[in-house]
């Protein structure tokens, strides 16, 4: 056995010469990803008809997926990983990794085809019997958007700020006019446009100057080889501004700084006003698409950085700017069947689009059992799942009050409710076009000593409203959830989808969205779910001799084509 001296840096270490010997002597994840990239059928694999010879898209895709398997999703991180990883070097056959721009373009192409990729991965999982197709569960997780919650503003405050900023910028224009008396014959609209353009130019020059000063300070601190002459040299800002802006040519030196500050304030205020007006227009358009001509609530918020994200209350981090991500998870090996990214904090609204995506990815799910927590409990969701032919089991919320509606027992035979004190409430009227029935018992409530705790009505009469269609669906769903089969199904609810979020967030380091906009955020989430499913296939590959043989045969066919 060779001995190594720990303090001798000139020791000779003999590495195996062939990458093939480092990777192919045992099952290796890199071998699987090379196999996977060659069995996938992605549209961007198509050859270009002109231009210089390029990198093989299959090999590049294999490296990118292999890097994502190790938790690297940024182009520069993937490039660095490829240079340091033996497995990635084996995939590239020892060639250098292309620039991060090429990697970035390939990732963008992968995002464009993420649905197509998801479908193919589900097909591979199905062929390897990783999907049970018997029972699935839905759950959601709120992930912080690539935007600060401090950049959000309510519709009411946004409207007031726009009005105030409009007044401020008019005042700034008036402040500027005495300094440019030579242009007093120019009409106000043209004069304001000229001032605005010159203000943007001045602001741009000041920004550049500020950046140069920051770089210079950094050099002064961290570059010991910088001589004193280089440390002190700089540009004359006043001369630069006068040479660039025609409004500043004739401004005397004693008022020069004041005029520059006014122009800079005009540019900053104008940019802020433009940003707020765009945000307000986007909010109004989105609200009209979703709600029609209903009035926008004053507290409705929009974020300037990512207008599609929303303020949400999270479990561990309080109020954050988030997206709400959902997935249907098969219970056999926790394969994800469908995903959806929404911007609503309510889980109820997101069950249906998540199931529709699962059907688009997997085909019909009719006949499967499905479980969900109380956040998805609604008559609309129960009816939707029933229409899709899915055996749906959902937990239901329980009111804390001892006199909540759920504490009143309904008897369908007599069409009456029984209150917690044993009195019977009959139907007294029907309203809202025959959809809502109202139940009460005047005599019993007047005699009941607990009526003050039971109702806040001024007359002391407790009234129960019953939706003649939806309440029946809710009661049937509660009965299913309380059955022995329902309890057994819902008992597994936390143990199936919850670990998926932990695995994705831990192995991918996914604590925050990187993409902005609902469409891009949805693709990002789906790509993470694709990688989760791929990890299940890799686990099977590393433990199954028969599947290793399939990968080996594919390697041989590529290396030694017939």
Image: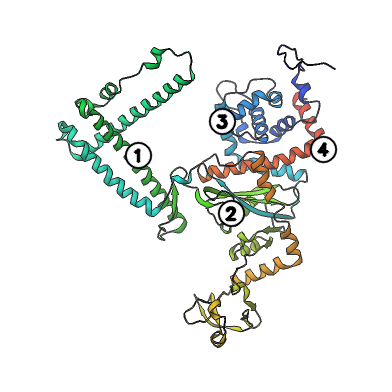
* Mark-to-mark CA distance, 2 and 4: 36 Å
* Mark-to-mark CA distance, 1 and 4: 60 Å
Pick out the residue farthest to the right. 1
Which is more N-terminal, label 4 or label 2? 2
- Residue 353 is labelled as 2
Q: Is residue 190 visible?
A: no
Q: Nearer the viewer, mark 2 or mark 1?
A: 1
Viewer-proximal residue among 401 and 473: 401
Crowd rating for badge 3 (residues with CA inside 10 Å; few <14, some 14–19, many 20+):
some
Viewer-proximal residue among 172 and 290: 172
Which is more N-terminal, label 4 or label 1? 1
* Position above or below: 489 against 30: below
Q: Nearer the viewer, mark 1 or mark 4?
A: 1
The reply to whether the C-beta atoms of the residues labelled 1 and 3 are less than 8 Å apart is: no
Image location of residue 377, percent across then percent down: 61, 63
* Mark-to-mark CA distance, 2 and 1: 37 Å
Image location of residue 325, percent across then percent down: 59, 49
- Residue 104 is labelled as 3
**Circle 4 is placed at which residue position?**
544
In-image side of 105 versus 205 (left or right): right
Name the secondary structure under disc 1: helix
In-image side of 108 versus 276 (left or right): right
Q: Exactly how many numbered labels are in the figure?
A: 4
The reply to whether the C-beta atoms of the residues labelled 2 and 1 are less than 8 Å apart is: no
Pick out the residue farthest to the front. 7
**Circle 1 is placed at which residue position?**
271
The reply to whether the C-beta atoms of the residues labelled 2 and 4 are less than 8 Å apart is: no
Which is more N-terminal, label 1 or label 2? 1
Image location of residue 173, percent across then percent down: 23, 39
Name the secondary structure under disc 2: helix
Query: Quarter-wise, where is residue 248 in the image?
Result: top left
Crowd rating for badge 2 (residues with CA inside 10 Å; few <14, some 14–19, many 20+):
some
């Amino acid at each position: 056995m060779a001995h190594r001296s720990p303090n001798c840096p000139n020791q000779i270490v003999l590495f195996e010469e062939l990458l093939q010997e480092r990777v192919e002597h045992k099952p290796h994840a890199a071998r699987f990803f090379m196999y996977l990239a060659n069995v996938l059928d992605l549209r961007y694999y198509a050859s270009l008809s002109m231009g210089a010879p390029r990198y093989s898209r299959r090999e590049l895709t294999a490296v990118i997926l292999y890097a994502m398997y190790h938790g690297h999703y940024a182009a520069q991180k993937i490039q660095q990983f490829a240079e340091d990883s033996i497995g990635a070097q084996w995939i590239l056959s020892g060639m250098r990794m292309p620039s991060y721009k090429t990697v970035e373009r390939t990732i963008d192409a992968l995002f464009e085809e993420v649905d197509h990729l998801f479908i193919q991965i589900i097909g591979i999982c199905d062929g390897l019997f990783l999907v049970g197709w018997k029972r699935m569960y839905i759950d959601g997780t709120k992930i912080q958007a690539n935007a600060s919650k401090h950049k959000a503003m309510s519709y009411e405050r946004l409207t007031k700020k726009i009005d105030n900023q409009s007044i401020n910028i008019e005042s700034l224009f008036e402040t500027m006019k005495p300094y440019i008396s030579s242009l007093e014959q120019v009409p106000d609209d043209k004069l304001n446009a000229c001032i605005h353009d010159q203000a943007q130019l001045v602001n741009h020059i000041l920004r550049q100057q500020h950046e140069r000063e920051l770089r210079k300070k950094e050099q002064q601190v961290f570059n010991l080889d910088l001589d004193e002459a280089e440390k002190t040299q700089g540009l004359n800002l006043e001369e630069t501004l006068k040479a660039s802006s025609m409004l500043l040519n004739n401004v005397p030196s004693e008022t020069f700084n004041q005029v520059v500050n006014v122009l800079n304030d005009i540019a900053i205020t104008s940019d802020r006003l433009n940003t707020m007006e765009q945000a307000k227009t986007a909010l109004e358009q989105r609200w009209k698409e979703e709600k029609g001509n209903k009035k926008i609530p004053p507290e409705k918020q929009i974020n300037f950085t990512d207008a599609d994200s929303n303020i949400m209350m999270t479990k561990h981090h309080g109020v954050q700017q988030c997206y709400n991500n959902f997935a249907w998870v098969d219970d056999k090996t926790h394969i994800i069947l469908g995903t959806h990214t929404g911007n609503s904090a309510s889980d109820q609204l997101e069950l249906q689009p998540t199931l529709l995506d699962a059907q688009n990815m997997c085909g019909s799910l009719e006949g499967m059992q499905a479980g969900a927590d109380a956040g998805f409990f609604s008559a609309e969701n129960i009816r939707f799942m029933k229409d899709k032919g899915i055996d749906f089991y959902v937990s239901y919320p329980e009111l804390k009050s001892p006199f909540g509606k759920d504490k009143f027992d309904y008897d369908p035979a007599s069409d009456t409710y029984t209150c917690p004190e044993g009195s019977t409430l009959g139907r007294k009227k029907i309203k809202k076009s025959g959809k809502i029935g109202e139940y009460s018992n005047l005599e019993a409530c007047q005699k009941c000593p607990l009526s003050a705790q039971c109702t806040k009505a001024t007359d002391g009469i407790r009234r129960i409203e019953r939706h003649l269609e939806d309440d029946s669906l809710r009661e049937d769903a509660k009965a299913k959830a309380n059955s022995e089969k329902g309890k057994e199904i819902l008992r597994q609810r936390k143990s199936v989808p919850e670990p998926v979020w932990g695995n994705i967030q831990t192995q991918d380091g996914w604590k925050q969205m990187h993409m902005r906009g609902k469409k891009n955020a949805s693709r990002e989430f789906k790509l993470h779910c694709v990688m989760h499913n791929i990890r299940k296939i890799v686990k099977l590959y590393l433990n199954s001799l028969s599947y290793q043989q399939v990968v080996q045969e594919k390697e041989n066919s590529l290396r030694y084509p017939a």
